[in-house]
Image: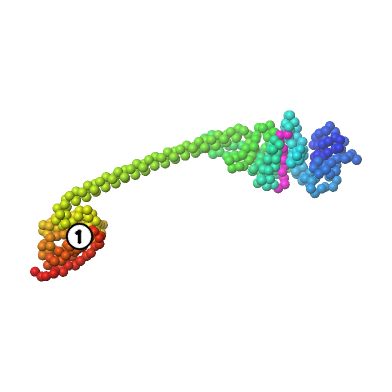
Amino acid sequence: MGYTALHPVWGRLDASLDDLGCGRAWTDVHRVKGLQLACPECGGRVFARASQHRVRHFYHQVRPQDCELANESAEHHLLKLELALAARAAGWRAELEVSSDARNWRADVLVFDRDGRAFMALEAQLSPMTPDEALMRTDRYAEDGVAVCWVALQDRPWARVVPTLTVRPPGRRIESWTVERGMARFVWAPTTLQAKAKWVHITCALGDAVEWILRGRVRAHTAANGAVWWTAPAYEELAWARARLEAEAEAAERAAAAERRRKEAEERAAAAARRRRDAEQRARARSEERRAELQRLAGFFEYAGMDPLAWETFTQMVRSASGKAITYGDQSPSHGNGLLVYARPRWASDGFNLAGVVCPDPEALIGWPAGLTILVPNQTWLARVQAAARSPLKVAVLDPATRRSTFVKVTPARTA
């Protein structure tokens, strides 16, 4: 059943209007024999009647399966009428079941402005629909300059992507249709960033909601997550103010974080520069120490016939061979003018002990202390020690040229 019909002479009839929208009375169509009325949707013959609740409408003599008007539910039928009555009560011209010239949409209720231009469709949507279908149908209206408000009886997935009112029908005759969801206000007090803010859906009479929408007192608002609802411009401004405050706070935090990172980078760079300077100073100090040590040992190098440039390698081989920390003393006349080597375990903290002698004069080996290692840099020195040995000796041949270490137990070549 529908509210509209077509008369061959009078044109379009609207049962919800006292004059049927064409200056005729209901009695001109109700129970009038031979009257030819057609459905504007399918063209089938329709007749005028009133329901048990005195709701005037048109019905098909034979209900066609493919006609939407003929197969509307009673709830859909009553909700359409309620939307039309609400728009008219707010002072607007509203027509039921109006199709576009291209017939690419048909509005349940089409509302016209003061100049007679259609500007808002009120759609009672009770049948299933996907979010994509809702967006597509809303875009069709928008192409013709018509906004749309969808009205449903229960929460649907598509209701979150297009402007929608979810309503509850009246339980009794004295009650009115009520909006339960789709109309919201922004709650934020006090207006500081520390205070919580949220959108709160409000309930109101459907007639009030329709009036607010048509008069522009509320408008469709799209949230950051894509959800859509109706709200007053003042609440939108408040939400934008909150968003700006959050954005400013976030920007300030990002700037502060960037400044912290810059300072940390500067501190790391300064620390790296200090470490580099300290390393350079330590390297210079070690270089000075090595140069001083080489100057101190110049006489020994001349005595032992050793290349000063190979001394660092020789020293590394001594440390590696002994596994201990070492330090050099002076040439010792009592040890054949050899260079004294002191050592201590790496993990120990007490003092160094005499552990070996570098290149002692072979003539001093006659009374050489047992267990005191002799360190020589090549086979030539080893041969001299072997030739002069008068008692068993421990000799470490640490050749800096070949970087090979050889440990030899020397036995006396002849007895005294």
Residue 101, given in percent of the width and then of the height, sits at 76, 38
Q: Residue furthest right?
A: 33
Q: Residue at x 28, y 45 (%)?
A: 280
Seen from the viewer's position, the closer of residues 306 and 250 is 306
Is 387 left, or right, of 98 in this rendering? left
Q: Which corner quadrant of the image does residue 198 belong to? A: top right
Q: Residues within 10 Å of mark 1 (few under 14, many from 20)?
A: many
Confirm whether the magenta stretch covers residue 198. no
Name above or below for residue 185 compared with residue 282. Answer: above
Is 347 left, or right, of 245 in this rendering? left
Seen from the viewer's position, the closer of residues 137 and 410 is 410
Q: Residue at x 18, y 61 (%)?
A: 376
Q: Residue at x 17, y 62 (%)?
A: 381
Seen from the viewer's position, the closer of residues 371 and 339 is 339
Residue 385, given in percent of the width and then of the height, sits at 15, 64
Look at the magenta stretch and give its main secondary structure. Answer: strand
For label 1, the residue is 377
Q: Which residues are magenta?
A: 118-128
Is 219 left, or right, of 174 in this rendering? left
Q: Is any part of residue 167 visible from this angle?
A: no
Q: Which corner quadrant of the image does residue 38 belong to? A: top right
Residue 175, given in percent of the width and then of the height, sits at 73, 39
**Secondary structure type for disc 1:** loop
Residue 106, given in percent of the width and then of the height, sits at 75, 40
Q: Which corner quadrant of the image does residue 1 belong to? A: top right
Give the residue type that dot 1 points to.
Answer: Pro
Q: Residue furthest left?
A: 416
